[in-house]
Image (cartoon, rainbow, N blue to C red):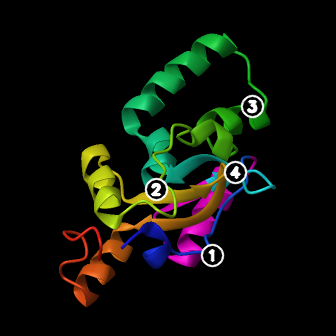
Amino acid sequence: MDAAEIMTRFVVTVAPSATMTEIAKTLAQHAISGVPVCEADGRLVGIITEGDLVRPLMKSRERRRDWWLRHLAEGTDLAPEFVNYIKGGQASARELMRANVITATETTPIGEIAELMMINDIKRVPIVRDGKLAGIVTRADLVKTMARNPDALLNPSG
């Protein structure tokens, strides 16, 4: 079995300009934990996950940011737009995404995709054709395939 047989073809994506809020709404609306970042022509440029959205909110980072902002301001008020941007509310997908995305093609055997997920500790592998997003294979897709065909991941000819 290969990726084309199990991949989701209609993939929810976000634009590189999408804000944290827009990305969070997209993830929540579709009950997904990560989303490919694509240009208007479908070219895959990155991937963003729940973890990437939560990372800027970490307490230790907040303390470092507050210290930096106090020193930058030198006792004066900073523009609210600038403070909001620094806090991450307006950070874009391009700023938060991981650009070095592990991908596969439609002909990649699902056993190889499972191995990519395990080795790289990832939950999804975008499937690309000529640099453009053609689909995605998630761990859930692999589990569903195993439920239907227990030997699918072990037998490359499926």
> Which residue is denoted by mark 2 in the rendering?
50
What is the crowding at mark 4: few (fewer than 14 residues within 10 Å), some, or many (at least 20)? many
Amino acid under label 3? Phe
Please rate how many residues cluster around mark 1, counting C-alpha atoms within 10 Å: few if below 14, some from 14 to 19, many from 20: few
At 31% across and 81% down in the image, what residue appears? 145
Q: Residue at x 63, y 76 (%)?
A: 10
Q: Earlier in the sequence, mark 3 or mark 2?
A: 2
Q: Label 4 belongs to which residue?
A: 19
> Which one is closest to the eye, mark 2 or mark 1?
1
Going by the numbered disc 4, the residue's amino acid type is: Thr
Helix, strand or loop status at disc 1:
loop
Specify which label sits upstream in the sequence, 4 or 2.
4
Residue at numbered disc 3: 82
Number of the front mark, 3 or 1 = 1
Residue bounds of the magenta highlight? 17-36
Tell me, for residue 72, which label it has, or none: none
Q: Reading the chain from its start, which is encountered first: label 2 or label 1?
A: 1
What's the residue at 27%, 89% (across, down)? Answer: 148
What residue did someone put label 1 on? 10
Alpha carbon separation for disc pair 2 and 1: 20 Å
> Residue 65 at what x, y percent from top left?
52, 25
Task: Give the mark nearest the N terminus, 4 or 1.
Answer: 1
Residue lying at 46% horizontally and 56% vertically, measured from the top left: 50
Residue type, numbered disc 1: Phe
Q: Is residue 139 magenta?
A: no
- Residue 135 location in percent, x, y? 57, 67
Q: How crowded is mark 3: few (under 14 residues within 10 Å), some or many (20 or more)?
A: few
